[in-house]
Image: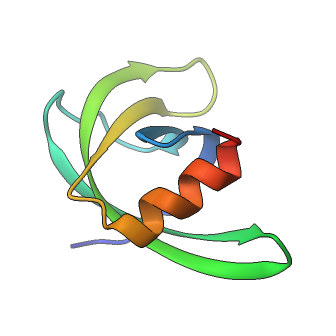
Amino acid sequence: MIPVKVRTMDIGKYGMSLIGIAKQLTVEQQVNVSFDMFFACKLYHVAVSARVSHCLQTANDGYKVGLQFFSIDAEVADLLSKYVGS
Protein backbone atom coordinates (compact mmCIF):
# COMPACT_ATOMS: atom_id res chain seq x y z
CA MET A 1 0.00 0.00 0.00
CA ILE A 2 1.42 3.36 -1.07
CA PRO A 3 0.26 6.46 0.87
CA VAL A 4 -0.92 9.37 -1.26
CA LYS A 5 -1.52 12.95 -0.11
CA VAL A 6 -4.74 14.47 -1.46
CA ARG A 7 -7.21 17.22 -0.55
CA THR A 8 -10.60 16.61 0.98
CA MET A 9 -13.41 18.31 -0.90
CA ASP A 10 -16.37 17.07 1.12
CA ILE A 11 -17.06 14.65 3.95
CA GLY A 12 -20.22 13.08 5.29
CA LYS A 13 -21.40 10.21 7.44
CA TYR A 14 -21.19 7.73 4.59
CA GLY A 15 -18.32 8.94 2.45
CA MET A 16 -16.06 11.67 1.18
CA SER A 17 -14.77 13.34 -1.95
CA LEU A 18 -11.05 13.74 -2.62
CA ILE A 19 -9.16 15.72 -5.25
CA GLY A 20 -5.55 15.54 -6.37
CA ILE A 21 -5.39 11.84 -7.09
CA ALA A 22 -2.59 11.28 -9.63
CA LYS A 23 -4.06 8.22 -11.37
CA GLN A 24 -7.53 7.11 -12.28
CA LEU A 25 -9.22 4.72 -9.88
CA THR A 26 -11.80 2.13 -10.88
CA VAL A 27 -15.42 2.32 -9.74
CA GLU A 28 -15.98 -0.28 -6.97
CA GLN A 29 -12.22 -0.38 -6.23
CA GLN A 30 -11.60 -0.76 -2.49
CA VAL A 31 -9.21 1.65 -0.80
CA ASN A 32 -8.07 2.43 2.73
CA VAL A 33 -8.38 6.05 3.82
CA SER A 34 -6.84 7.67 6.88
CA PHE A 35 -6.95 11.29 7.89
CA ASP A 36 -6.74 13.57 10.89
CA MET A 37 -9.80 15.57 11.82
CA PHE A 38 -9.99 18.41 14.34
CA PHE A 39 -13.41 18.53 16.00
CA ALA A 40 -14.69 19.82 19.35
CA CYS A 41 -11.20 20.97 20.37
CA LYS A 42 -9.70 17.53 19.84
CA LEU A 43 -7.66 15.90 17.09
CA TYR A 44 -8.96 12.54 15.86
CA HIS A 45 -7.19 10.07 13.61
CA VAL A 46 -9.72 8.33 11.37
CA ALA A 47 -9.01 5.18 9.37
CA VAL A 48 -11.74 3.59 7.25
CA SER A 49 -12.21 1.27 4.32
CA ALA A 50 -13.99 2.76 1.33
CA ARG A 51 -15.21 1.92 -2.14
CA VAL A 52 -14.77 4.21 -5.17
CA SER A 53 -18.19 5.47 -6.33
CA HIS A 54 -16.90 7.71 -9.12
CA CYS A 55 -13.64 9.05 -10.53
CA LEU A 56 -13.50 12.11 -12.78
CA GLN A 57 -10.50 13.82 -14.35
CA THR A 58 -10.22 17.54 -13.55
CA ALA A 59 -8.61 20.24 -15.65
CA ASN A 60 -5.83 21.08 -13.18
CA ASP A 61 -5.91 18.77 -10.16
CA GLY A 62 -5.63 15.20 -11.39
CA TYR A 63 -8.67 13.12 -10.51
CA LYS A 64 -11.60 13.83 -8.22
CA VAL A 65 -12.79 10.67 -6.48
CA GLY A 66 -15.99 9.95 -4.57
CA LEU A 67 -15.65 7.34 -1.84
CA GLN A 68 -18.33 5.43 0.03
CA PHE A 69 -17.31 4.18 3.48
CA PHE A 70 -17.91 0.58 4.55
CA SER A 71 -16.90 -1.48 7.58
CA ILE A 72 -16.89 1.71 9.63
CA ASP A 73 -16.79 1.23 13.39
CA ALA A 74 -19.39 2.79 15.70
CA GLU A 75 -17.00 5.35 17.21
CA VAL A 76 -16.00 6.75 13.80
CA ALA A 77 -19.62 6.70 12.60
CA ASP A 78 -20.65 8.69 15.69
CA LEU A 79 -17.80 11.18 15.22
CA LEU A 80 -18.67 11.77 11.56
CA SER A 81 -22.37 12.10 12.38
CA LYS A 82 -21.62 14.79 14.98
CA TYR A 83 -19.16 16.52 12.62
CA VAL A 84 -21.70 16.87 9.81
CA GLY A 85 -24.43 17.84 12.28
CA SER A 86 -26.87 15.00 11.76
Q: Is residue 83 left or right of residue 50?
A: right
Left-right relation of 1 to 80: left
**Residue 52 shows up from this direction:** yes
Residue 53 screen position, x and y as percent:
28, 26
The percent position of residue 45, horizontal first and vertical second, equals 54, 79
Within the image, what quadrant is residue 67 found in? top left
In the rendered image, the vertical position of residue 21 relative to residue 27, given as above or below = below
Q: Is residue 47 visible?
A: no
Foreground residue among 3 and 84 = 84
Residue drawn at x 57%, y 63% is 79
Q: Is residue 45 above or below residue 76?
A: below
Above or below for 15 versus 83: above
**Count of numbered labels shown in the rendering:** 0
Name the quadrant of the C terminus: top right
Q: Quadrant of residue 60?
A: top right
Percent position (x, y) of residue 27? Answer: 18, 27
Q: Nearer the viewer, residue 67 or 72?
A: 72
Which is nearer the eye, 52 or 72? 72
Name the residue at 36% across, 66% down.
Answer: 74
Identify the residue shown where x is 65% and y is 53%: 82
* Residue 79 as seen in the image, left or right of residue 73: right
Which quarter of the rendering shows the N terminus?
bottom left
Colour convention: rainbow
Nearer the observer, 71 or 60: 71
